[in-house]
Amino acid sequence: MTITITAFEASPDRGRGLARDMRVRWALEEVGQPYEVRLVSFAAMKRQAHLALHPFGQIPTYEEGDLAIFESGAIVLHIAQTHPGLLPDDADARARAINWLFAALNTVEPPIVELEQTGFTDGDKPWHAARVPMMQERIRTRLKSLSDRLGDADWLDGAFSAGDLMMVMVLRRLEGDGLVEEFANLVAYVERGKARPAYKRAYADQYAVFAALPKD
Ligand code: GTB
């Protein structure tokens, strides 16, 4: 059955692979599943045809036969649960890997998204400059705990898993902020993720979408 995902027709990240379709592309590449991509504009995401797939009018979505799901975490977990390669066989190890996937999304990503959003929405507010260090400190606290737990291991719990895939993608959202760089082992961790052949294929494919856009 063909797998079809959705991605931005013109991603605001200009091909940096920061939009959440990259997580899904990477997961599909890790398990060796071919897939098709339907590119959607911001306007199309808010139309009924897309809202039927994604109630919040966003990307990514995932369709395979009768199944249609949204939420990058749920999609990556589905891929990991239905194909070998992203979750350990042992039940306890599997639960721990899923644990890390949720930690990436529910504990590490929220303060990162908050900082990102405030730059867009509140940059001109008088209190913005004073709040930024506070938000950065919240992120730093999470990164310190993550760094302590990772130590000198390659991955968060044994072999590379869907939990690592999601954590690497979440940490990538801080690129250019200098925060991850305060923790040498996290820098090396992200680089290890990016060095995986599956990551490189996924990155190249999403970059090709940007590269094909008419240049103005
Ligand atoms: N919780 C959902 C998930 O994990 O799938 C969140 C999905 C989501 O935020 N989708 C974004 C979207 O569709 C794209 S990924 N936004 C359009 C809208 O809401 O109307 C978020 C994103 C967008 C752009 C960049 N960037 O340019 O760097 C990075 C991340």
Image (cartoon, helix red, strand yellow):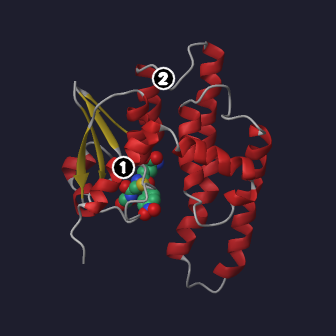
The x and y percentages for residue 207 are 34, 55
Spatial CA distance of label 1 from label 2 is 21 Å
Is disc 1 surrounded by few (<14), some (14 to 19) or many (20+) residues within 10 Å?
some
> What residue do we see at 75% from left, 63% from top?
137
With respect to residue 204, does 133 lie above or below? below
Label 1 beta carbon within 8 A of ligand 1: no
The quarter of the rendering in which ligand 1 is drawn is: bottom left
Can see residue 106?
Answer: no
Quadrant in the picture for the N terminus: top left
Q: Nearer the viewer, residue 118 or 48?
A: 118
Q: Secondary structure at mark 2?
A: loop
Residue 131, picture quadrant = bottom right
Q: Nearer the viewer, mark 1 or mark 2?
A: 1
In this view, the residue farthest toward the top is: 90
With respect to residue 36, does 119 lie above or below? below
Is disc 2 surrounded by few (<14), some (14 to 19) or many (20+) residues within 10 Å?
some
Q: Nearer the viewer, residue 90 or 119?
A: 90
> What residue do we see at 62% from left, 26% from top?
159
Quadrant in the picture for the C terminus: bottom left
The x and y percentages for residue 93 are 64, 19
User: Label 1: which residue?
Assistant: 204
Can see residue 42?
Answer: yes
Q: Secondary structure at mark 1?
A: helix
Q: Earlier in the sequence, mark 1 or mark 2?
A: 2
User: Label 2: which residue?
Assistant: 85
Q: Amino acid at mark 2?
A: Gly
